[in-house]
Image: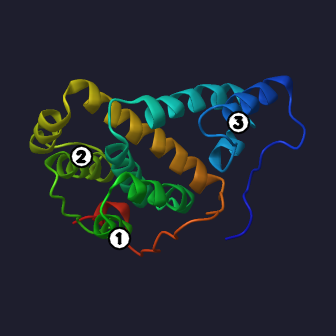
Amino acid sequence: MKGARLTPPARMTDAQRRVHDAIASGPRGAVVGPLGVWLNSPGLAERAQALGQFVRYDSALPLVQSELAILVTARIWSSGFEWAHHAPIALEAGLPEAAVAAIGRAERAGFDDPALAAIFGFVVELQRDRAVTDAAYGAAEAALGQVALVDLVGICGYYGLISMTINAFAVPNGEGPALPVLDVPAEQMFR
């Protein structure tokens, strides 16, 4: 892939610097990928990074569950940067390697943990079908409870925004495992 279509501003305004410094001094520790693109609109960057900090670090879901949602979202959106960044985190958090590989190929992943199975089914339907069946909703609500289920939808929405930013502005993948290139439209994934 060529370079990004839009990069962080070479000279930052006070508002851009403030947001940059807030991101860099927070739990992320750096301004990379889509966060750098967002600096071009400091109002969006400030609000989006605050949402991202919540869904990534403070949601009601344990790390392995949120990383599963992030990987499914990255696969549906074919977001290479997000995959390269989050596949290692998901593995370190305890997501089975076979499940990560299956998700990368847009195949159904099997889980022994009923909560992970419910999250997988819910996120696939929400991201792929733009709706969730009563069965998937019921399984996810039973496994997670209402607060975590709302947080799960927030994770999906935030990483959908991240993925749109990556794709629209051609953010390079960076370091990490490559997301397999598929010739399958999103609506056909995980069937």
Percent coordinates x, y for residue 186 in the rendering: 36, 61
Pointer 3: residues within 10 angstroms few (<14), some, or many (20+)?
some
The quadrant of the rendering that contains the N terminus is bottom right
N-terminal of the pair, mark 2 or mark 3, is 3
Residue 59 horizontal side relative to residue 150, left or right: right
| Residue matched to label 1 | 101
**CA–CA distance between discs 3 and 1?**
31 Å
Determine which quarter of the picture holds residue 188. bottom left
Q: Which mark is residue 24?
A: 3
Q: Is residue 77 visible?
A: no
Q: Secondary structure at mark 3?
A: helix
Residue at 28% over, 47% down: 123
| Residue matched to label 2 | 119
Residue 142 horizontal side relative to residue 9, left or right: left
Determine which quarter of the picture holds residue 172. bottom right
- Depth check: 131 or 11 in front? 11
**CA–CA distance between discs 2 and 1?**
17 Å
The amino acid pointed to by label 1 is Ala
